[in-house]
Image (tube, rainbow, N blue to C red):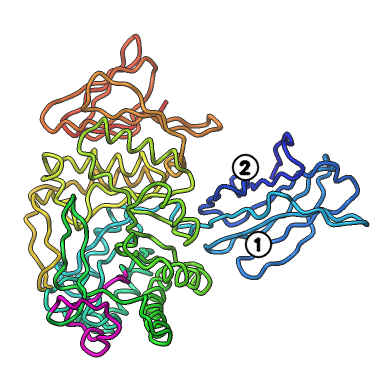
Amino acid sequence: MALPDRKLSSPFTLSLIDSRGDLKSLKSTRLTRLRGTHTYRVRADVNNSGRQKVFLMGNMGGDEFQTIPMTQCEDNPNCWTFEGTLPKSGFLRITSFMETEEARYWDPCGYREILVDPPLFNNLRMYSYLPGVSGDFNHWIKDLDNIKKMGFNAIHLLPLTEMGFTNSPYAAKNLYKIDPAYGTEEEFERFLAACVEKEIALCFDVVLNHVSCDSELARNKAHWIKGDPLRRDGLKRAGCWHGGDWISWEELVLIDYDHPDPQIRKEIWNYMEEYLFHWATLAEKTGGFIRLDNLHSSHQGFIKKVLGHLHNDYPGVGIFSEFFHSPEELRRGVKEWGLNLLLANSWEYPFVPPLIDYLKSLHQAPELRYLLMPTTHDTESVNRLFGGPKSIIPRYFTCALMGSGQAGMTMGAEWGEEEKIEFIKKPGRVKFHKNEDYSEAIQRINELHKNQDLFHKTGNIEFLKTNTDSLIVCRRFCRDGTSQLLLVANFNTHHMEEFHYGEKVSLLMGEGAKLEKMDWGIRIVLEPCGVAVLEM
């Protein structure tokens, strides 16, 4: 791997070169992200190192800190390198020092922090599956082929824990026991084995904040639940702010992570950590990850401790979080807790101009990684949010090909389900209308996402001006200039739109799109909800 030339700007300069040859300058004030690479090279440029020795210090293997001598570059006496292998995930913290006969000179900038994401997160296409309407494990196994055929390589499962009286998967009666409506432990193991065989990773949803008010904890460990003297049962309910109103979730009681008795507080923390690790163990079997529900409302001290342990004990298990907060708090959470993936909220932008601004903001925060989805199991349907079921095509196209390499879709969108699928109900196999079938379009989008590396980076996007607010047009490019793609999406659900471009391009993928070559360039005509990828 050739080392690029560098200009020194400080006595110590640390850079990292990944397996693709990309160089990243390591800053002590900024978290650096690495994705999907197995080897790396650290380069230290040290002024006037001459005949001295330069060392690297940190947890290069992902575990204990160690000191390793660096190798001097043959063509530059002030350049030193070290080559290592990345851990599966977690934090690297590294610094350097120069040693002479008289003294040891430390890098004054201190440690640089690097968050290593599991390789799957570099090219993630996740299908959000609704267990409560999908029958038992034997049905789930049969559904895997269609999910795989559409091009998804991971499945998000809503919590599988035994449910309380409301039949909500987020109101657990027992945190360890799978709801018997889904099948037996043996059938669950067969489902896990089928996912491994088909190379589909599983994302298990974990709820750390609350349990059902009729749960075993509420009945047998009521002193573990926050108190509320105004309640007949004395247990405090969970809830959320919606606009300016507080909505109380009557079926959910809050776990008391701040219990005043240190021994009881320790018991609560240990129990909830074991619950998290129980599902992390299952995720590890499939090369998958966990999803932290409602992380913005979680106890920050507990989260910091338990996620630190998770990184150490389950280094290959990634952390995906529902964490809605200010950009500053998001950066802090990612840096302190090692969150590999955040849930974006693109569904809150139904109109094109604000959606473009939102996409731009995601690319301007390289230390953050977002999973982009048109809808979630909590939102209304694509039809209700965006004016028609066919809107799934430009919406998923945008999520998959205009983000940073992680995209998802909620079950039912491929069938054009007009209404939201209610996941809070007595489990069983529901017969869906399936009036439409957009699975082939989803498949073609996922195929592009899988095979084009430029979709898995941040900052390599440029949005172009159009004459209508119904179109999103952008250019995705490789920084070395080897590849450029033009993406065009029509969000108009009723009318055709067209876009003119003054260069010759070819149609790489189109869904409801027609390309006409003109003397001055190209004219592309898109049907309602049509999309196109053009090769430049």
Q: Nearer the viewer, residue 60 or 494?
A: 60
Tell me the residue at 55%/49% (across/down).
Answer: 32
Give the SS element for disc 1.
loop
**Residue 508 colored in magenta in the image:** no
**Does residue 372 sit above or below 227 in this rendering?**
above
Q: Check disc 1 and report the residue beneath it.
A: 60
Q: Residue at x 65, y 55 (%)?
A: 111
Q: As drawn, which residue projects farthest toward the front?
A: 229
Q: Name the residue beneath numbered marker 2.
A: 23
**Residue nearer the viewer, 372 or 211:** 211
Tell me the amino acid under the disc marked 2. Answer: Leu
Instruction: Give the residues drawn in magenta, as a range.
Output: 206-231
Direction from residue 119 to residue 223 in the image, left or right: left
State the image quarter where residue 273 is shown.
bottom left
Indicate the quadrant where residue 320 lies.
bottom left
Residue 222 pos. (x, y %) = 25, 86
Q: SS of the residue at dot 2?
A: strand
Q: Position of residue 467 (x, y in %)?
A: 25, 18
Q: Amino acid type of disc 1?
A: Met
Left or right position of 67 against 417: right
Looking at the rendering, in which quadrant would you find the C terminus?
Answer: top left
How far apart in space, not on screen, are marks 2 and 1 (Cα)?
18 Å
